[in-house]
């Protein structure tokens, strides 16, 4: 394969251009593994990179923070041609050309062997969003969350992290309440397993009250901002929230009160620099007991040509569930 197609973000005089281009192997960055990419996926961060040009460390860049595919050349003893691998996180799609490409080249240290029992397509239905949802559930359970402790809130529930967290928790026996800004998606969230679906406005702390009626044994929060303020004020005694995102804002006003009177736990979730040993364990769990039902309606499969529009849509909260990009 001498040439291949990729979505390329290039810097022109004072702006950046996003175009599908025909590239040559020598256009790829350095790395031990050259991969024929089967699927990538679309995450909120990809919109930040490709459309808003945030987090971009160098141009030109092929965005795409996730990829799954087959090794076609390996300069590292741990992998050989024909191996199926997953690559997410690190600098993929921000500082190193990523998954929106038919071919990619990455350091071997970033590669996760595809776990037995997971297909390349399923790996990208999960992708960074699924990894983050899985890491969130694991952290909550490591901190004592169990189904009989009470209801669990998932905020931003129709998004990638949210949809997968709803489904994973429901399958594990939790009583899940999903909050969403999309009233039209209540039935979708119930089909994923939510017992109750509530409006996003009900879980925003507009009054700056650090302590309210105790509601949740745990929460998965990819939203942040006033939603996280609300969650911190409503966790039950010893309850935990796993914070992963910022779609609702980065500033959080709280006080020590819920921490020192209810012993609550505010757990930070980082998928990017998660150490490989822990990363492999999360992928194992995602393949076994955390594996979501791959509901057809959870997944939208698109081509490279359709990708630029979806990258805009995800920033405008117009995307539901997971979007995967078929590359070969
Ligand atoms: N820490 C990590 O390692 C890590 C990993 C993955 C993702 N993230 C972050 O997690 C967040 C979600 O990522 P994603 O890929 O799941 O994104 P996504 O698919 O776009 O989902 C985000 C969801 O957030 C909700 N939302 C959007 N704008 C909002 C607003 N202004 N106020 C309140 N809620 C809003 C929407 O859900 P509803 O319409 O249902 O309310 C939306 O679907 C992003 O901030 C992303 O950067 C972090």
Image (tube, rainbow, N blue to C red):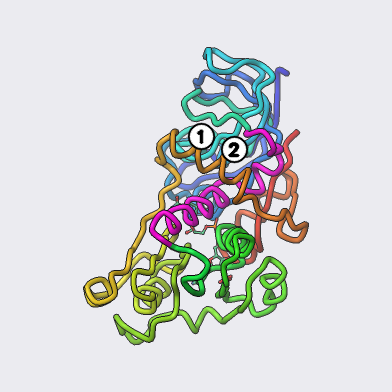
Is 254 on the left-hand or right-hand side of 322?
left
Q: Image quadrant for the N terminus?
A: top right
Give the vertical position of 199 relative to 57 (above or below).
below
Would residue 50 be found to the left or right of residue 291 on screen? left
- Residue 152 x, y percent position in the rendering: 50, 70
- Residue 158's spot in the image, x, y percent? 61, 67
Q: Quadrant of residue 326?
A: top right
Which sits earlier in the primary sequence, circle 2 or circle 1? 2
Q: Is residue 230 above or below residue 128?
A: below
Check mark 2 vs ligand 1: CB closer than 8 Å? yes or no: no
Tell whether label 1 touches label 2 (CB within 8 Å).
yes
Residue under label 1, please give it: 60
139 left or right, relative to 78: left
Image vertical order of residue 190 relative to residue 69, above or below? below
Q: Is 236 placed left or right of 74 in the picture?
A: left
Q: Secondary structure at mark 2?
A: strand
Disc 2 to disc 1, C-alpha distance: 7 Å
| Quadrant in the picture for residue 298 | bottom right
Q: Which residues are magenta?
A: 115-144
Which residue is more in the foreground, 223 or 25? 223
Q: Position of residue 26 (x, y in %)?
A: 58, 18
Q: Position of residue 57 (x, y in %)?
A: 41, 39
Residue in the image at 41% along x and 60% along y: 144
- Image quadrant occupied by the C terminus: top right
The answer to whether 142 is drawn above or below residue 63 in the figure is below
Q: Residue at x 46, y 67 (%)?
A: 219
Query: Which mark identifies residue 8?
Result: 2
For image coordinates 28% across by 70% down, the residue present is 263
Provide the secondary structure element on which disc 1 rests: loop
């Amino acid at each position: 394969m001498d040439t291949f197609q990729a979505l390329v973000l290039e810097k022109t005089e004072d702006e950046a251009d996003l175009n599908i281009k025909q590239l040559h192997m020598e256009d790829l960055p350095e790395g031990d593994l050259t991969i024929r990419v089967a699927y990538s996926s679309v995450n909120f961060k990809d919109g930040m990179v490709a459309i808003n040009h945030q987090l971009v460390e160098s141009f030109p860049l092929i965005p795409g923070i996730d990829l799954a595919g087959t090794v076609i050349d390996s300069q590292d003893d741990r992998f050989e041609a024909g191996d199926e691998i997953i690559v997410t996180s690190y600098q993929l799609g921000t500082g190193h050309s990523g998954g929106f490409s038919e071919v990619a080249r990455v350091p071997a240290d970033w590669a996760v062997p595809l776990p037995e029992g997971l297909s390349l397509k399923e790996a990208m239905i999960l992708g960074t969003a699924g990894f983050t949802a899985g890491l969130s559930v694991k952290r909550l359970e490591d901190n004592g969350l169990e189904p009989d402790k009470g209801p669990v809130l998932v905020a931003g529930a129709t998004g990638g992290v949210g949809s997968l967290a709803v489904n994973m928790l429901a399958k594990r026996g939790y009583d899940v309440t999903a909050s969403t800004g999309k009233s039209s998606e209540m039935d979708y969230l119930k089909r994923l397993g939510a017992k109750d679906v509530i409006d996003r406005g009900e879980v925003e702390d507009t009054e700056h009250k650090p302590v309210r009626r105790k509601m949740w044994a745990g929460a998965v929060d990819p939203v942040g901002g006033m939603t996280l303020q609300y969650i911190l004020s409503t966790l039950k005694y010893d309850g935990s929230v796993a914070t992963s995102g910022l779609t609702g804002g980065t500033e959080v006003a709280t006080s020590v009160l819920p921490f020192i009177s209810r012993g609550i736990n505010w757990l930070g979730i980082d998928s990017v620099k998660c150490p490989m040993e822990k990363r492999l364990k999360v992928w194992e769990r995602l393949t076994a007991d955390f594996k979501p039902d791959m509901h057809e309606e959870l997944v939208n499969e698109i081509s490279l040509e359709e990708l630029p529009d979806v990258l805009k849509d995800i920033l405008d909260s117009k995307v539901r569930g997971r979007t995967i990009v078929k590359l070969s």
